[in-house]
Image (cartoon, rainbow, N blue to C red):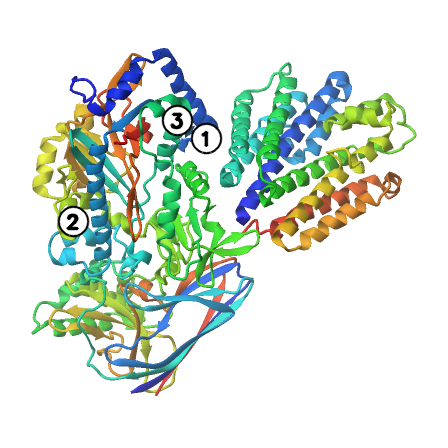
Amino acid sequence: MLGKTARGLFWMFRYLERSENTARLVDAGFRIALTRSAAASDEWSSIVTTAGVREAYLEKHSQFAAAPVIDFLLRDRSNSSSVMSVVDAARANARMVRTALTREVWEATNECWITLKDLLARQVAETDLPDVLAVIRRQSALVRGALHGTMLRNDIYDFARIGTFVERADNTARILDVKYYVLLPSVSHVGSSLDNVQWETILRSVSAQRAYRWISGGTASPMGIAELLILDRRMPRSLAFCTAQLRENLAFLADDYGAALPCHDLAEGIYRDLIDRSIESIFDSRLHDFLGEFIRRNNELGARIEHDYRFYG
Amino acid sequence: MNGNGEGPREPYCEYCRWFAGEDPARLRKKTQEAETFFRRTGITFNVYGQEEAAERLIPFDIVPHIISDREWARLARGIEQRVRAINAFLHDIYHRQEILLAGRIPVDLISNNEAWLPQMVGVSPPGGIYTHIVGVDIVRTGENEFFVLEDNARTPSGVSYMLENRETMLHMFPGLFSRIKVREVSDYPKKLRRSLAACAPAGAADPPVVAVLTPGIHNSAYFEHSFLADQMGVELVEGHDLSVVEGRIAMRTTQGFTPIDVLYRRIDDDYLDPLCFNPDSMLGVPGIMDAYRAGNITIANAPGAGISDDKAIYSYMPEIVEFYTGEKAILSNVPTWRCSDADALAYVLEHLGELVVKEVHGSGGYGMLVGPAASKKEIAAFAAKLKARPANYIAQPTLALSTVPILTRSGLAPRHVDLRPFVLASPSRIDITPGGLTRVALKAGSLVVNSSQGGGTKDTWVLEE
Amino acid sequence: MRLRITHRTEYAYDGPLAYALQELRLRPKSSHGQNVISWSTTVDGGSKELEFHDQHNNHVELISFNPGGRAISVLSAGEVETSDTAGLFGRHGGYAPLWYFNRITDRTRPGPHTRKIVKALGQEFADDISRLHALSAAIARQVSYLPGVTDATTLAEEALEAGKGVCQDHAHIFIAAARLMGFPARYVSGYLMMDDRPEQEASHAWAEAHIDALGWVGFDISNGISPDERYVRVATGLDYGEAAPVSGITRGTNAESMIVTLQVQQ
């Protein structure tokens, strides 16, 4: 496979994953703004930060309010991480690697692009927002479904999955990092309704409300939420799940190509550090530092994969 | 139909009987289905000078262009003869130049022509093949009267539309194909790969490694590039995927470098190699011309093949065919006035209203004047351009083209078409796809079939005997 | 005459090179008046990728630089047996047609100064060869030999206007003028053994014009003679661009310094 093709697959799926994650973030923000209008501005601000586009946002807007934030995150092409930008980029990458995709995957991607281009052609009215966000998530899921249902489990598939999980791990870690303070066992906040709403937001932004209810039996605790999103390997957006998948897909590649590369050691290291931990030890060693370190290592892994598999000349 | 109001020509009879039994509303709905199908699969082309978002569909007409087996046999003989002559001409013009020494074509035509590449002098491509893929644009004026409009010996495009048009027809009208036996075109990618592999250089891998070189996803024909790579089962590469490794051109893979034996390139000569041609090119591969001249890679089509399809050279094709094959050309050339010639220029200026005037180096139907369809003002403006740079133009009469039917809102209606059969040349054989890409002028009376100018396409049927 | 040539070109860069390819036209061929006894190209800091013959039948070697390297050196060395052919190179051969040598290039595009020098020659000549010798002499008179004023990109017309230049400029002006007069002409790069010393400053350049009666005839404008047994022809072309000893592309860093050491001796 061409290095460029591996790069295209990796980024195509990173971008598709990002479109879905951004839609979830907006959904969570929208919900909190509806229920607690006093905290709305802070909430939109933290969402823009989580999306990693704070600087770009502040170049265009001076205040954090629903309409400009939603527009910036969904439609603004000057924001390279907006849903429209990343769907454009995902499709451009899909075109580049079209010879590596099944017709189903290509068509699902193309339809995703056609649908969202149409849907996001105009500013989204607040009343339409829930539907629009659902369509964005669904379109990304359709591509994933086509991938699972039609692609050979070979290196092409592995690079697609690796892109997905590098992006997802980054996303979950960022959500936690921006909100880490509400998860800290601090006397003044425990049991307050603020925390409950914030916890709800965190769960919503990774579509884990229901999973958490099942697991926790209905009692929310910050440590329980952190444990679910960091260490629970059953939860498909947790850091443990993502790193286990990365390790596994990289192992398939090593097997396929008959060579283990530095990225394999990195992935193994990240994985080991997670599964050997208890949530208490993570809290003891400062959650914020832990998350910062995780994000850094996850990025390093992405860069290492790009290098080891010759994504660029 | 023959365009003279005399009813359909013989090859159309069975189709017309089928058509008469169909519900017109259902057929019109099929046309829309075809569009949705093309849009979803992304069979689009980009229009230059428009927003990147402007990926357009080429309109598709569901009525096939039908050619009888007998007509096709004659056409195929003529095309094969022409392609052999073009290849012999290219070898000659980059070696001894016998045709110039014999005075059969003027030296000026070559010496002042940018399509003649000095870097190709003395180069003998692997297998002796210069034009691995040729598209010959053909029109008909009557029973067994075919004219060649132009030869495309650089990187003829459109074959993906030919293949997808047939796929679409099979999908929409399966019953029609069991009723009428049509020759297969779907093995084109397989034949292309075989033909390219047969031109691999000495020392190539077995089987040879073939790749398609594209300028990238923003190129107007990108869909076709990826389509062909996909269908052939070979890599689709861009310039920055390639480098010189141990004297060969190799592609960067996830596991290291893999040398390429045959590169089907879809970028122009000028952009092919910044070391040898345009130094500003970001699309090409530095050193590829050196690897080529060292005999380490096959480039298809050969650099410099464009000298054979230049519109000024075109007017000498009957002489060229005769010089290299010793036979009269089977296919006619459209009579051509070379405006570089003073007498010809005078005639052309006098008769602009009746002629089609084209730029010598132009393509895609841009910069041309269709006299009968032009206003007085347009003609006057064109006359000024012509006088300013006469050598830049040739002129041809508008032929009394025959027509084929298309489906319009009010039923079948005659339109002008041209046909581009695709020809594969390898050392041992010349393969011609039975049929080709039919391009159709969608406006009544129009002669312009280029997709960039609002033309459409249709499936082309060569009937089995 | 048996000439021993040692030609080393060293490039140094101020940063690591990402990618670089260079075409070398440094290898002389046995031909009219010269017989190559031995020759070798050695590359340090890079590797030889391939070799071929170009449209002028020049022997071209393509070398790549080691990625990440900062320096490369190319050593061309060998022995050539030469004889004096009074500047005659014989009938035109090869596939490049004679008309090609009438082609105007950017470096050899004639302007008012070129036309003036041609016009000033007049028509009073017994034959073509004396006309061309007169041209050579006229150029040498008008453009004094002075290194450091012009470079590889200087046009014939510019050098003629400036009145200063080196052998390359002399050759370009001669070629521009000769083509204007209707003679096919070409640029020759090669070696010259200067009688007084083994160390040479740079490789030499002269020109050849094609005269129907004689074939190709060489003119070393800078030295006012036709090449003799002290000359070794290495490469030819329409101008410097097609015959350059080293040309190519580098990516990754800009500034480079080049040191050439050249010895030609008996």
First in sequence: mark 2 vs mark 3: 3
Which residue: 64% across, 24% down?
Answer: A70
Q: Quadrant of the C terminus of chain B?
A: top left
Give the percent coordinates (x, y) of residue A53: 65, 34
Task: Confirm whether circles 3 and 1 share one chain.
Answer: yes
Q: Quadrant of residue B297?
A: bottom left
Residue topped by disc 3? B170
First in sequence: mark 3 vs mark 1: 1
Total number of numbered discs in the rendering: 3
Task: Confirm whether circles 2 and 3 share one chain.
Answer: yes
Label 1 secondary element: loop
Residue topped by disc 2? B320
Q: Are marks 3 and 1 in contact (CB under 8 Å)?
A: no
Give the percent coordinates (x, y) of residue B350: 9, 32
Residue topped by disc 1? B42
Which residue: 31% across, 30% down?
Answer: B182
Chain for disc number 2: B
Residue A142's tag is: none
